[in-house]
Image (spheres, coloured by chain):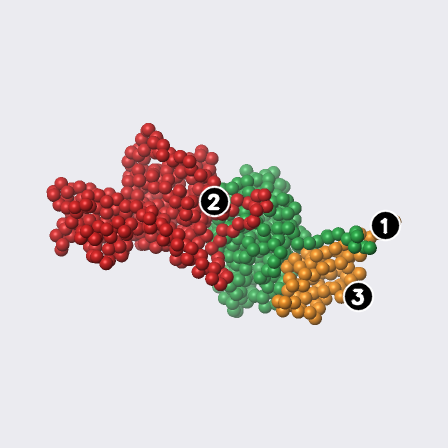
Chain colours: A green, B orange, C red
Amino acid sequence: MSEMNEKIVFEKPESVIDRPTHYCPGCHHGIAHRLIGELLDDMNLAEKTLMTTSIGCSVFLYNYLNVDAVEAPHGRAPAVATGVKRARPDHFVFTYQGDGDLASIGMAEIMHAANRGEKMCVVFVNNTVYGMTGGQMAPTTLIGQTTTTTPAGRCMTHEGAPIRMTEIIASLGGVAFAARGSLDSVKNIRQAKKYLKKAFEFQVNNTGFGFVELLSGCPTNWKMTPLQANERIQKEMIPYFPLGIYKDVSEEGGVC
Amino acid sequence: MSRIEVQEDRCKGCLLCTTVCPVDIIVQSDRFNVSGYKVAEVPEADADKCTGCASCAMICPDVAITVYRTPKKKGGK
Amino acid sequence: MTKKAERIFVKGNEAIARGALAAKCKCFFGYPITPQNDIPEFMSSEMIKAGGDFVQAESEVAAANMLLGAGATGIRAMTSSSSPGMSLKQEAISYMAGSEVPAVIVNMNRGGPGLGDIGPAQGDYYQSTRGGGHGDYRHFTFGPGTVQEAYDLTIRAFDIAFEHRTPVLILGDAILGQMKEPINPWEPEGVDEEGGSDWAITGRDGGREKRLIKSLFLQEGELAGQNKHLQAKYDAWTDLAECEEFETEDADLVICAYGSIGRIAKSAVRKFRKEGKKVGLFRPITLYPFPSAQLKALADQGKRFLTIEHNLGQMLDDVRLAIRTVTDSDFYPIYPGNLPTPDELEEPILKSLEGK
């Protein structure tokens, strides 16, 4: 009899395509995809979304979200998305990039799209490693972290320090919103969705550039189980990459 | 009374769901799915303990969990 | 075609920008580099006035990628640069070709390799006609020789880009870019500004199936299929090859030259004709597709050939390929860094004429 009143309180969002993903067990891409899918549904954006995908494990994002998409070269998604948004200003435009794509080869493109205040959103999935290509050092790899190109662990004097992108992006003029969240716990996932929502709203209201970094795990290349990977995020990554909002122009009275 | 449904062919056996359940009823089963992963499940015996909080569903990277909640009956309604 | 009555006196660079405007180009993405800065400068005000948009990008790489994005949405858009900047754009152009995104790219060729100089040259011919980036692809390439031609071919470039879902390159040089001539700035009629109604990403309005602009094909057989499809597209362009044949009918020697060098060679041909020498000019207007059939037809008539280029011999390969079963071509290089004159060409033309 209880079935009569049973209702679904959690299910796959409409915008997430019903198919298995190629991601490793415990990879957080799937969580990020779901959050985006939920927001596109909630905010009625799916049919006016023009997504720009990037190069990395998430290169197949266009197979998992039911929106129009253009595939960008490695690092260039913010530039490609600039072209998309300038050509179709009344559409919803976002990029989805990993740490190699955004902070290494794409450093110029993200800095300038942010600085120009392009009315777009960037979802930055940071797992401190180049995942797709097998675990090389990334700009966000932590000091001492072993990767296939830092077999002795990342060394400050040889490789420099990991880059904190959200702090840098927050310092740029055209940025309306910059925040860092994490996908390692239910509480943090809820908070991350709120950050994404704010960033999306800034675009919908034509205010400015929205940037959300999501700390994520890569169990395979960290050589850990998914549970250990989540612990690493809590114990090692969050202390270096603190969570929170780093810029929110609604507190400041708007972007010029 | 609430319950979850795990889409077993999507489960990758990452076990993240087992760490967030507030009543600790999700476990790794002995069953392999078609992809070769040992899927997560709620044993029959513990099914009625589910609170429908959806924490498991929220942390599942494969969106493999659907959560159903039946509101508690109050005065015959 | 509507002929506008009033002629205007403009540089080649401005003519190209005006041609784009007339063709209803809606977005321009550029970056400063000599000798083409007039193009982004003109577009920075005119594009906005025309209801479009302009971005001075952070680099030529970024500008080309912006063009990829705009083109993917079915909007007419353009970028311009010069040789070193063109090298930067090659990855994005390869993506445009592989994803079948229409776009117009302008290269005002300067001296190379490396930083080179800021004067004219034709050293980018290979890059322009062989697909300068990675992979097997080509893009339609025009080689205008006059400022009017630069205007006309820019308009044509947009039509070709959208008709064939391809990047199109306009290959000029510093002479053409900086030279001023009077032109008739005619406006084309019936321009379809919303190209790509059946493939462009415009949002899944009304719940249609999602569209994807991509060049990644990993499933077995997929990439081979895509490459075959592209090859078929390029093969079909052969009929669109264009050239100018000047005084070739009774010529003993045919000079092959394109762009500004074609123009200078034309002056040399006129001079020789006055002296009774039977010289003609074969001037390709489309560099890809190269007008091979037309050139071969001249070879079959027993003529001799002298290729003159502002490089170390690039179009020469295409000339030789076209006439290889019949004869060969002499070659005279004008070295990048030197400015060619008709007088300089006298000696090599005479030598070829006399069969030496």
Residue extending furthest bottom? Answer: B30
* Distance between mark 1 and mark 3 Cα atoms: 25 Å
Disc 2: which residue? C196
Circle nearer the viewer, 2 or 1: 2
Disc 1: which residue? B74
Residue C179 position, x and y percent, is 28, 39
Residue A216 position, x and y percent, is 60, 58
Q: Chain of mark 3?
A: B
User: Residue drawn at (64%, 44%), measured in percent from left and top?
Assistant: A43
> In the image, are marks 2 and 1 on the same chain?
no
Inspect this view and state whether residue C173 appears: no
User: Residue drawn at (34%, 31%), measured in percent from left and top?
Assistant: C3
* Amino acid at pointer 2: Gly
Q: Chain of mark 1?
A: B
* B28 on left or right of C288: right
* Distance between mark 2 and mark 1 Cα atoms: 58 Å
Residue C190 position, x and y percent, is 42, 36
* Amino acid at pointer 1: Lys
What element does badge 2 sit on? loop
Disc 3: which residue? B45
* A47 on left or right of C219: right
* Distance between mark 3 and mark 2 Cα atoms: 58 Å
User: Residue drawn at (63%, 41%), measured in percent from left and top?
Assistant: A251
What element does badge 3 sit on? helix
